[in-house]
Image: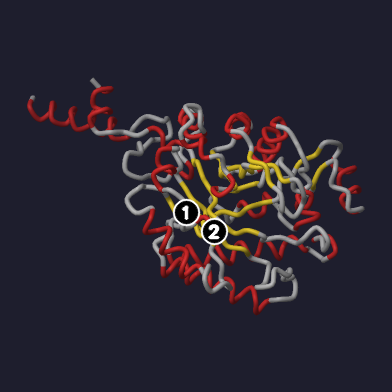
Amino acid sequence: MFVGLLCSIGIDYSNANMRGLYLNSGDVDTFNPTLLVNGGITDVFVLSSRFSTSNNYSVILPKVLSKLKGTGIRVHAWIICFSDAQGSFINPTNNTYYLNQLIDDIGKIVNDYDIDGVQLDYVRYPIDNPAYKYINGDEYVTNFTRSVRDKIKGIKPEIMFSAALVPEWYEVDSNIVNDLNRQGDISKGVNTTLLYGQNYVAMSEYLDFLVPMVYRGFSLKLGSVFRDTFWVESTTRFAVERVNKPVVSALTTYISNDELETSLTLMSVGDVNRDIQSVYSGGGKGFALFRYGVLDKNFFSDSTNGGDLAINQTNNSSILNKTSPGDVFLNQSGFPLFILFGFICFGIGYWRRK
């Protein structure tokens, strides 16, 4: 009887995980909403520039929101933080005016557009100007994250807040990795607090979910040159075990032949799906593919694509316990509350009839 009831009201268990996709400015006019829907994409992270004219967030966000209207796909403004219009690093230790202006701009985006989330990117020190050079360098990153959280939650309490983080991992003892990192060597692991000022535990207090950039294709600046699927799993698990917030791993959909990404080779659908499966094996609550313009479009129609893989992850609960049409409200035991409510109503009715 209850199975029939579930079917009759259209409960959609495919919303159990976040299945994200990044949209660069060049993808906005070309992406196909139908492909995203058919591929089970639940969230898009849209590059929202504060500097460009043609690609400014005021131009980009309305286009994406219009194209995705009625699809149920959530839209996140993807914000580059410690970088100016020329791409130069903005040091958070001595640029209070810039940071305050950035926080105000992010607040304006949340206030003016019907977006579902904000994701901070490049909220870190660069590898050639590491955080350890500054006293309590990581606290500047954490405090900025907190300030953004306070600003946007004050405008829209239900807004989803995340940050793209350098993947933290250790192939050898952490003390050895720390010594190597101070020498500029990231071949055996990365301490993100030490190098980039990204303290996962401290930042997680202010984030709704964390997005480690588990890029195994080629990213010398992130210390992840040509890793394997086991690295994707173990790096995801490392984050999961450290924080009490959902972890959604970002994955590349291509192999870069050089650090500047002037030559790219698309990963096969099978390789993308194996990376996705590795995220779930590591305890991740979802994935975010980087990115639409360099993703094999067969991914959206393949019978074993990430959407199907995500649906099969029965141990992963809904990201942030956010609900949308078709989601199931659960109590702590995992029992659907509307069914429990039905039992109570039935009992009250039966008692009154007696």
Q: Amino acid at mark 1?
A: Thr
Q: Which residue is mark 2?
A: 26
- The percent position of residue 87, horizontal first and vertical second, equals 70, 68
* Badge 1: residue crowd in 10 Å (few <14, some 14–19, many ≥20): few
**Left or right of 2 on screen, residue 74:** right
Q: For the N terminus, give its image quadrant.
A: top left
Give the quadrant of residue 295.
Answer: top right
Q: Which residue is mark 1?
A: 30
What residue is drawn where x is 34% and y is 32%? Answer: 336
Could you tell me which secondary element the residue under label 2 belongs to?
helix
Near-viewer residue (276 or 138): 276
Near-viewer residue (2 or 351): 2
Q: For the C terminus, give its image quadrant.
A: top left
Give the quadrant of residue 111.
Answer: bottom left
Could you tell me which secondary element the residue under label 1 belongs to?
loop
- The percent position of residue 86, horizontal first and vertical second, equals 69, 72
